Amino acid sequence: MPGEELHQDLRAGVRDLCKAFSDTYWRELDVQRAYPEAFVKALTDAGYLAALIPEAYGGSGLGVTEASIILEEVNRSGGNAGACHAQMYTMGTLLRHGSDAQKRAYLPKIASGALRLQAFGVSEPTIGSDTTQMKTFASRKGDTYVIRGQKVWISRAEHSDLLLLVVRTTPIEQVKKRTEGLSILLVDLREAVGRGLTIRPIRTMMNHATTELFFDDLKVPADTLVGEEGKGFRYLIDGLNAERILIAAECVGDGRWFIERAARYAKERVVFGRPIGQNQGIQFPIARAHVNVEAADLMRVRAADLFDRGEPCGAEANMAKLLAADASWEAANVAVQTYGGFGFAEEYDIERKFRETRLYQVAPISTNLILAFMAEHVLGLPRSY
Ligand SMILES: Cc1cc2nc3c(=O)[nH]c(=O)nc-3n(C[C@H](O)[C@H](O)[C@H](O)COP(=O)(O)OP(=O)(O)OC[C@H]3O[C@@H](n4cnc5c(N)ncnc54)[C@H](O)[C@@H]3O)c2cc1C
């Protein structure tokens, strides 16, 4: 199917699926901080979360461009793809660096949804963005690894069968470069919980199913190692561009949702005898937010296209994430202002989406760290961190 036609079909299909999950559905889950199980099941059953898995392993073999359209449409419909976006891309590390046996064992089941691999364990409480300083350590003992340490902000761990875990396997003092000595393990959470792994939920300002993980001498088989021991940092970096592009698309979806809602409300709400949207003080900020979302979308499309062609796209993926997160946040703010007091009322959903889209200024990488990357790697400025 030619690209444009496929994209329109995907948009229409996801929109249609999302119609069954109304604003009320998302609002009630938000109040309860409950997982959108029915939505995730529907998206999985329709095959959308297997977009990036090659056909040989039961997926649809699509590119990041198409995957990003799927996630954008979820957010554009008022939903939150953050509940399951990682099921799409976490398997990329396994696909690119896993053994044939691992790929055959896991990918078809991830594609069908029989297994969920949507937990990715990098962040730790004491190191912040300085990832190579991570303390969680896996010692090789015969044919097992014994894991000790702690992770924080590990999202969806309670709704995942597998966890892609980044650990140190060589102490930082014993490596030449601090990026060496990190490894990636594919941990079966069904085996691990209660046998050395404790998962503790963290309640956050939005419904994100995030958790803390405590590893207390958890033993996992040595064949859970993905790729070569010590090369984990490189594998980690490989996956980040796809994640940034996909999250940029979610932000574009959020931005378009805010602008649609704000424009609609501005036409309907009559104050001082005329629609508030007739005032330039209301219509200009909405128009500006629209301009910024559409500009961010161009960078997202460009980054996704480069990624799908196999060309370098680090700068574009980072720029797309920064521009789209800024644009969705601006649109969120504008929507609250347009709705006035009702922007704060749960029943209009603006405040919920406002809280949800705020995350993308901080995670999966904070705006400052993107700027630091651009300054150093694109502009050749001295490294600031
Ligand atoms: C809801 C949620 C879900 C998440 N899900 C996951 C997940 O599933 N898996 C996972 O591994 N992680 C996850 N994260 C963690 C997320 O990736 C981090 O929060 C993010 O990368 C920022 O790291 P930090 O919180 O440690 O902030 P810090 O590194 O402590 O930074 C704090 C602030 O200081 C700034 N800063 C730090 N260093 C510099 C510098 N050198 N120059 C300028 N500014 C600087 C940062 O930009 C930030 O604004 C999640 C976080 C949240 C909140």
Image (tube, rainbow, N blue to C red):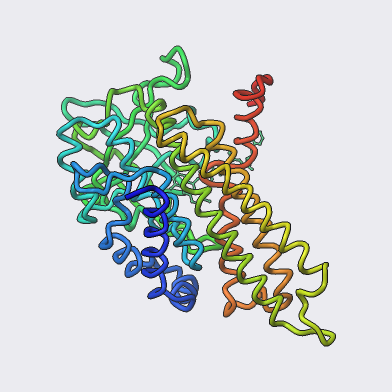
Quadrant location, the C terminus: top right
Horizontal arrangement in the rendering, residue 279 relative to residue 170 (left or right): right
Looking at the image, is 254 positioned above or below residue 190?
Answer: below
Asked whether 84 or 4 is in front, the reply is 4
Looking at the image, is 376 positioned above or below residue 2?
Answer: above
- Residue extending furthest toward the right: 272
Number of numbered markers: 0
| Relative image position of residue 198 (x, y in whole percent) | 33, 51
Residue pictured at 53% horizontal, 63% vertical: 206
| Relative image position of residue 243 (x, y in whole percent) | 45, 43
Residue 118 appears in the picture as rendered: no
Looking at the image, is 199 positioned above or below residue 282?
Answer: above
Residue 168, picture quadrant: top left
Residue 344, picture quadrant: bottom right
Residue 345, picture quadrant: bottom right
Residue 185 appears in the picture as rendered: yes
| Relative image position of residue 373 (x, y in whole percent) | 60, 29
Horizontal arrangement in the rendering, residue 320 relative to residue 215 (left or right): right
Asked whether 3 or 202 is in front, the reply is 3
Residue pictured at 44% horizontal, 72% vertical: 29
Horizontal arrangement in the rendering, residue 163 relative to residue 318 (left or right): left
- Residue extending furthest toward the bottom: 273
Image quarter for ligand 1 equals top right
| Relative image position of residue 343 (x, y in whole percent) | 67, 74
Asked whether 78 or 134 is in front, the reply is 78
Residue pictured at 52% horizontal, 39% vertical: 302
Residue pictured at 20% horizontal, 37% vertical: 103
Asked whether 361 or 129 is in front, the reply is 361
